[in-house]
Amino acid sequence: MVITTTNPDAEEQLHSTFASRYARAPIPKFKMPEKSIPSEAAYQIINDELALDGTPKLNLASFVTTWMEPECDKLIMASINKNYVDMDEYPVTTELQNRCVNMIAHLFNAPVGATETAVGVATVGSSEAMMLAGLAFKRKWQAKRKLEGKPYDRPNIVTGANVQVCWEKFARYFEVELKEVKLSEGYYVMDPLKAVEMVDENTICVAAILGSTLTGEFENVKLLNELLTKKNKDTGWDTPIHVDAASGGFIAPFLYPDLEWDFRLPLVKSINVSGHKYGLVYPGVGWVVWRSKEDLPDELIFHINYLGSDQPTFTLNFSKGSSQIIGQYYQLIRLGFEGYKNIMENCMENARVLKQGIEKMGRFKIVSKDVGVPLVAFSLKDSSKYTVFQISENLRREEFSRSLAERLVADLERVVRKIDTLPSTESTKDGHITAIVDETRDSDGVAKRIKKSETEIEEETVTCWRRLVEGKRTGVC
């Protein structure tokens, strides 16, 4: 949901040139029209306005899937009117969801026997998925504290300061203290050692990120598991781990099969992943899976029967569409392990091409790592004349193929050369990286410019990252 800031002037009218043959009078923008208009007119009016929206395939900053095969599009459109929650009416869709849960659980190495069923659920996105996981941790912690006769009113969760905004939402909405491990210079993910130091008896879980929104880097879940296991043994606690694999969950199993981050680690009790990111499905669908049935408290599962038969449900909302669940099942059986692996390898190769091209220009510092989400995060080495934001404003790209990666490098070099010829401007936009020179004044009030060292530049870059994190302006989940 987006909180609108439009001034709802009831008298403001919407005029449409092409629809005027059907609707000669303008319609109000913020009040329901008094009279009906032809369907053709309604379509044309809306279509004309949507033409000013960005094209999804041109949105290079998005992690979200913008294209699927025509066959899958047909399945999605054929089921767009199905309400997933009505399991009695649409039992096959429910079965497809269960198949997806089991496929994903096996992909994450859940200890599911040959005759057992994995525990998990489809969600609207990773935000809902991680909130469901967080609620499960909170309830289990509260139940344990009650049995021990200890206070259970001050739960907390430990994360890195680089977490997506949905974690702050969870903490605020469900009254859980968010204890964030601050970022350090050159290290833009959670430090497992510092995270474990922050754990106390009120910690319901430690949340690790497999694919940071800021840099795409994977956090060291294996080291976190080792350190937390030792602390649990020394203290008698049983603090668990949740892995937010929104971005990396559909990457690591295919590109880094030997990387231990999932249910192979004993303290990992739940994992969420975005089907609409590298799961290759349109928004919005996410998934959360638990290690075992014991990790999901029964009290959180509701049983309803007013739509027909008994229907267990564990979601924050009730109704939701079936289309994206069907789309996920299509991708899983259509691509298989081989197909996903090929796509992720192609994405990673494109990222390498882009990284190499940017490095050769000599103007930028690469911030992202080689192991992680296939993206390239970089900053300007010299921000005295312009900022990375000004460069970004001059670049727009389509879905990312190898040729487009090469074109982006060429366009990036063309843009910075063009900006080089423009007068230097001082930007006041919040979040811009400070320039390489700083303007101060002498005793007479005359401005003078002082060259900054590389260390000072790096410190300011870190400060910029911290401002970005603290403001939680990190996109959607």
Image: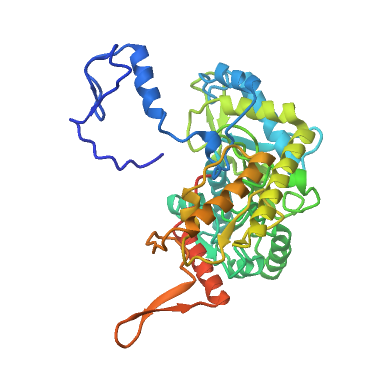
202 up-or-down from 249: above or below = below
Quadrant hosting residue 222: bottom right
> Please, which residue is most extreme toward the front here?
421
Q: Which residue corresponds to the image point at 54% horizontal and 78% vertical from the top-left?
A: 453
Q: Which residue corresponds to the image point at 38% horizontal and 24% vertical from the top-left?
A: 48
89 up-or-down from 99: above or below = above
Query: Where does residue 8 sit, x and y in percent of width and height?
Result: 23, 36
Query: Where does residue 383 sit, x and y in percent of width and height?
Result: 50, 65
> Please, which residue is most extreme toward the bottom here?
443
- Would residue 193 appear left or right of 472 to someone viewing this image? right
Quadrant hosting residue 7: top left
- Would residue 40 appear left or right of 274 to someone viewing this image? left
Q: Is residue 285 visible?
A: yes
Q: Is residue 159 visible?
A: no
In the image, 261 versus 225, the foreground residue is 261
Q: Which residue corresponds to the image point at 77% horizontal and 51% vertical from the top-left?
A: 264
In the image, 446 versus 377, the foreground residue is 446
Q: Where does the N terminus fall, quadrant-wise?
A: top left
Task: Give the total number of marks visible in the rendering.
Answer: 0
In the image, 295 versus 95, the foreground residue is 95
> How is the protein colored in the picture?
rainbow
- Would residue 457 appear left or right of 257 to someone viewing this image? left
Query: Where does residue 153 sit, x and y in percent of width and height?
Result: 47, 59
Query: Where does residue 151 sit, x and y in percent of width and height?
Result: 50, 62
